[in-house]
Image (cartoon, helix red, strand yellow):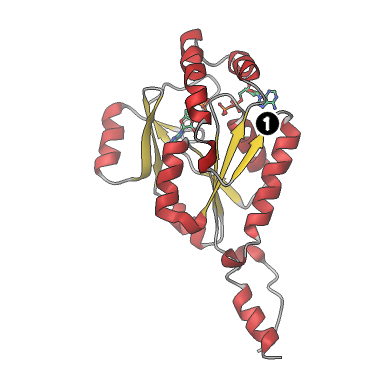
Amino acid sequence: MPNTIPHDDTLHRRGLMLILSSPSGAGKTTIARKLLAEDSEIAMSVSATTRPMREGEVDGKDYFFVDEAEFERMVDASEFYEWATVFGNRYGTPKAHIRDRLKAGGDVLFDIDWQGTQQLFQKAQADVVRVFILPPSLAELNRRLTGRGTDAPDVIDARMARAQAEISHWDGYDYVVINDDVEGCFEKVREILAAERMKRTRQTGLIDFVRGLMAG
Ligand SMILES: Nc1nc2c(ncn2[C@@H]2O[C@H](COP(=O)(O)OP(=O)(O)O)[C@@H](O)[C@H]2O)c(=O)[nH]1
Ligand SMILES: Nc1ncnc2c1ncn2[C@@H]1O[C@H](COP(=O)(O)OP(=O)(O)O)[C@@H](O)[C@H]1O
């Protein structure tokens, strides 16, 4: 058999699960959207949530917006990989399609909190890459939440009140990136993704190539 270099990486590696977490307003949605726009090998895991839809959000794209009863049905039917209650609303990661996508060599991007991160890590340790995004300061975090203009003042206060508790989970992540400048932060996340894709354990297609090399 000729010893050829695999020409299409996507067919020869297992997909990874890239998790982005941060205190609310630090910029993970912004980074996630940029990544999805530039990288066709990664697709978003769309969560289900009971939180009300924000202006500009699209049902089925940003979240599947469901009521409490439907969320409960999905929990009972084991349709979630993991779920958690955040800011009084429920959020869950649907299982549908994720496993198949990983097997086919596609990556999946998750915007989930530290609770979901712990659960996914327990279930799929080898596939998970955990990235935590920090704001440059709490004052800037407040400015971003206010500037985003999507939440009422009491909701912003609640998110600010939770920020330090969320930041305290920073050490449960593989990588920590400060989102001072969006482009710089995005570049770092891209570099992390590029390096993780090259991990030996993910490059399943290399086994045959190396065997061939060694056989001379
Ligand atoms: N565990 C878990 N957390 C989620 C899920 N989807 C979203 N979250 C988290 O819920 C929190 C609130 O999200 P959201 O209401 O969209 O506000 P954001 O913080 O401004 O993005 C964020 O920390 C998200 O990462 C999910 O499926 N599971
Ligand atoms: N590096 C940055 N500098 C200034 N503003 C930013 C930066 N990153 C994100 N933002 C803005 O801050 C707000 C919150 O960002 P978002 O991505 O929605 O955060 P999260 O998803 O973590 O809640 C948005 O209005 C976004 O445009």
Quarter location, residue 187: top right
Q: Residue at x 63, y 84 (%)?
A: 211
Q: Secondary structure at mark 1?
A: loop
- Would residue 6 appear left or right of 44 to someone viewing this image? right
Quarter location, residue 26: top right
- Quadrant of the frame with the N terminus: bottom right
Confirm whether residue 145 shows in the render.
Answer: yes
Q: Is mark 1 within 8 Å of ligand 2?
A: yes
Residue type, label 1: Asn
- Relative to the observer, which residue lies in front, 82 or 96? 82
Residue at the extreme top of the image, as rendered: 153
- Would residue 6 appear left or right of 155 to someone viewing this image? right
Q: Label 1: how many residues lie within 10 Å, few (<14), some (14-19) or many (20+)?
A: many
Quarter location, residue 180: top right
Residue indicated by mark 1? 179
- Quadrant of the frame with the C terminus: bottom right
Provide residue 50's location: percent of width, then percent of height.
37, 27
